[in-house]
Amino acid sequence: MKWGLEHGFLYAYPQELAQYQGRQRFAVLLADYFYVTQKFAKAGEVADRLVKGDCGELGEGARQYPRFLSATSTYWMRGAEAAAAEYLKMVQEVPSLKGKDVSFTIDRAAYSAGNTGLTSSTEVGRKKAMDLLQELAFSGRENEFVFKARIAYGVALIESGKREEGKNILESFPDSAGEYRAIAQEYVRGYAETKDSSRTSSGK
């Protein structure tokens, strides 16, 4: 709550919250309040009611955020795979993540689907997550979730044994990525130090 007061929003980003007025805006803020206070069932219930139109009919774009919040509440109640399935439903409604009209919330859902999917119990699920992160990471857009996807994709490649490919991706951030470029560079330095340490301990 303190963070929300300092930054001016709780869980819906300002560009998401700007879509709502009146009762709908109050409902989004209420759902966010329940979410940040870890009342996940209540957050999901309010979000689902918004999607159903209980606070007035929502356009397709405005339905995306409460659907995302419902899926994220599901993560805490039913686990990563259940949440990933809900995120994927949203992502699959757009023809391509490389399209010009992909919304901020869809980017958010795509990152969440890919990141949670990396822990899938099946190889197919993990492969789908990697493909999704790759598509989002190189969508051509620049926002928090595109940059996070690039970091997650690069790190996952390194940890799967594709060190050079992953390192090259982590080093490919534009200056405009700001703090995410710095985070990626920290990962590169960390893996380099780990590699050097391994060589030293093996006497090579």
Image (cartoon, rainbow, N blue to C red):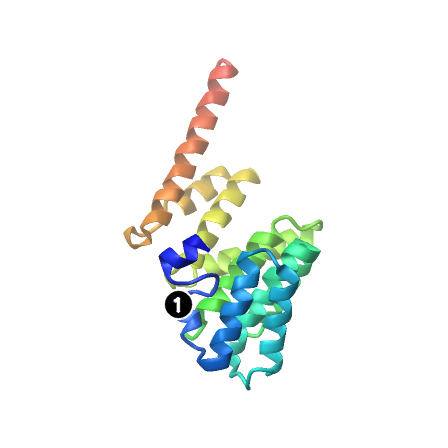
Please provide percent x and percent y for residue 89.
62, 69
Residue at point 31% right, 52% down?
Answer: 174
Considering every residue shown, the one lying at the far bottom of the view is 57
Residue 97 visible from this viewpoint: no
Residue 55: x and y in percent read 56, 82
In the rendered image, the residue lying farthest to the left is 175
Examine the image and state in which quarter residue 193 appears: top left
Q: Judge from the rendering whether residue 125 lies leftward or rightward of residue 28; answer left or right.
A: right
- Residue at point 47%, 43% (across, down): 166
Q: Across the whole image, how many numbered discs are drawn on residues?
A: 1
77 horizontally vs 23: left or right = right
Q: Position of residue 67 (x, y in %)?
A: 58, 70
Label 1 sits on residue? 14
23 and 181: which is toward the camera: 23
Q: Amino acid at mark 1?
A: Pro
Q: Using the image, determine if residue 69 lies above or below residue 197.
A: below
Residue depicted at 59% across the width and 55% down the height: 38
Q: Quadrant of residue 42?
A: bottom right
**144 vs 32, nearest the viewer:** 32
Task: Give coordinates of residue 81: x percent, y percent.
Answer: 68, 56
Q: Residues within 10 Å of mark 1 (few under 14, many from 20)?
A: few
| Relative vertical location of residue 16 with respect to residue 203 in this rendering, above or below | below
**Residue at x 57% of width, y 62% of height:** 34
- Give the farthest residue toward the top: 203
| Secondary element type, mark 1 | helix
Residue 66 visible in the current orientation: yes
